[in-house]
Amino acid sequence: MNKYAIVKKSASVILFAAIVIGVFWLMQKKVTDNITYCTLISIMVAVALTYFQSRFLADVLERSESVKNAKIEASGLRARQKRLEEKVQKLTTELEAANLKLKAEIADKPFDQRQLQQRLKNLNCLYALSKIVNRQGTPLEQIFQETVNLIRQTYRYPESTCVRLIFDGVRYQTEDFQKSELSRHVQIKAHEEDVGIIEVYLQGEKTESGDDTLLKDEEDSLLSAVAEWLGSIAERKKAEEKMHLFRNLIERSNDCIFAVEPKWGRFMDVNHRACDSLGYTQKEFISEVTLKNIDESIPDDYAWQKQIETLKQKGDIVKEARYKRKDGEQFFVETSLKFITQEKQDYIIAIARDITERKRSEAKLKAAQEKLLETARKVGMAEVATGVLHNVGNVLNSVSVTAESIQKRIRKSKVSYLSDAVHLFEEHSNDLAAFLTSEDRGKKLPLFLANLSQELIEEQAKQLESLEELTRHVQHVADIIQLQQSYSKTKGLTEPASIAELIDDAVKINAESLSRNKIDIRRSYADLPVMLLDRHKVLQILTNLISNAIYALAKSSNQEKILALSVNEFKQGHIRIEVRDNGIGIPAENMTRIFEHGFTTKEKGHGFGLHSTALSINELNGSIVVHSDGPGKGALFTIELPFKTQETTA
């Protein structure tokens, strides 16, 4: 309560008391002596007068007080206004002085002022460009078009400035675009490659003042800044577009794709194919399911941690496993796992492909392949047997020729002349001396016997030579048959063998054909250890290749026919066998078909030899390739086989 209110109330109380007392005294003196009446009348008059005072006199007093207060406040305000006017006048004076000083400085440096104004425009342009870029959902094309207009407004003479922006072959330009001689070009780069260009053209003639030309440093720096910014924006937008495209491709993939957290195998993200194949929703995958729940090869945390260790060592692994769907059904998958570290965070990318149908096909193919291999093995054995019989037949022909030659010599033998001489000796046994010295026949008989003896000795030598040749042929037949029998007993067995001896045995089997076609054998064998090999299968391979080379040489018109055989260890645990001939060669169109089943160029061939050879080499985990420079230029068959020794298997 303020001081004025207290005074007002005090005055009202005093006035009320005075009125009551005065009226009471007056009534008692002039009207009645009754104290009660006097009191009531006094109070009523006092109340009426008090109401009148509060209703009218108080307002007057208040108004007079308000006027007084207002006058006081007005006086204070006038004093304050005067002080403010003095300060304003002082500041105005100071500002005028500063303005004059600034004008003087600007007058001294007009170019700096324009440079500051241009820099301000540049900043406004970059600010406006940032607002455009930060608008959500603004396409790159709109950003480029608005940038063109912003650049135009930044220049001192926008109405005379034309701007064009080219990005990825698409043009964005200002209205009424025209080229001019006065221009500026800045390349837009993304990933350190030129992806676009900003072109600015100034219409009209070039001014003489260097300050008014288009090519000012501030304007150039703006173009460079905008080009750099647009390049980064383009990189980001392109990256976002590629990310969006990549996500769509992942979602539409036929394979199940997972992003997995390595520590516990929790899923961080999956594609739609994974959800469809396994029966879980994406939310269930991320919140409830782990890789251990679907992969039967990972039954517990220990198995998972062991697989993670292997994955960290190798970086990526590919494995076959069985996945379990939500309903419990299982199916075969081939899973590719890759361990990735990005921004100090480890991830596993898993790509699983359903191979159930492939497994069924592989089972059928394996059964068919086993049947085919068995057939090929039998065909290969028949091929070797055919070669053996062919060579035996050739040797028997030689035996027959030799025996016939011996028979002819025996029939034409002059040994019968010896019996005639003996008969003459018997006739003249009594006068043998006279017969030999007196008669003409007797005189010629010693010389005849001497000549006959010489001829019989020569005849004996020829007969012995023929008999020795006959013996060799018979022994050759025996050796071939024995060799075939020895290898047929070891079919399918791995045993110690010398690869050089195996090559020589294959040569022996084909010896007659080699000799008949006058083929020169050239050997080049490296010093190799005794190996553990399937002797029968390797011999079958070598016999087929040598037989094939003999056929090519026999059909060749070359005077010198060469069959070169070599073997070496080209890397540890692997040998390379080469069978080279200078025969009729192989046409280019036959190079890809030469190992096909049923393909042959021989008149009486069946196309099993090289096919069975390739299958046998495949069974031995080896490989075979053929090379030829063309018809008439020979051929080279190269075999590579792994091998072990008794030391490595001990």
Image (cartoon, rainbow, N blue to C red):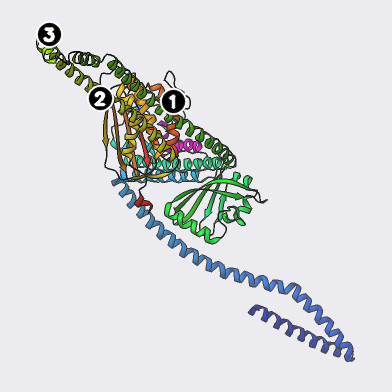
Q: Position of residue 100 (x, y in %)?
A: 34, 51
The answer to which image quadrant residue 625 occupies is top left
Nearest to viewer (mark 2 / mark 3):
3
The answer to whether marks 1 and 3 mark residues whose Cβ atoms lie closer than 8 Å is no
Horizontal side of 468 relative to 488 (left or right) equals left
Which residue range is magenta in the image?
A: 139-163
Element class at badge 3: loop
Query: Which quarter of the image is occupied by the N terminus?
Result: bottom right
Q: Is residue 585 visible?
A: no
At 81% from the left and 80% from the top, the residue drawn is 47
Q: Which residue is mark 3?
A: 439
Q: Which residue is mark 1?
A: 593
Q: Position of residue 433 (x, y in %)?
A: 11, 15
Q: Rounded to the nearest whole Å, what is the CA distance between mark 1 and mark 2?
A: 52 Å
Q: Which residue is mark 2?
A: 464
Of callouts 1 and 3, the N-terminal one: 3
Dominant secondary structure of the residues highlighted in magenta in the image: helix
At 54% from the left and 61% from the top, the residue drawn is 301
Q: Is residue 505 visible?
A: yes
Q: Rounded to the nearest whole Å, what is the CA distance between mark 2 and mark 3?
A: 38 Å
Establish if 537 lies above or below 101: above
Query: Which quarter of the image is occupied by the C terminus?
Result: bottom left
Residue occupying the far front of the picture: 430
Type of the residue with mark 1: Arg
Q: Number of numbered discs present?
A: 3
The answer to whether marks 1 and 2 mark residues whose Cβ atoms lie closer than 8 Å is no
Horizontal side of 635 relative to 443 (left or right) equals right
Of callouts 1 and 2, the N-terminal one: 2
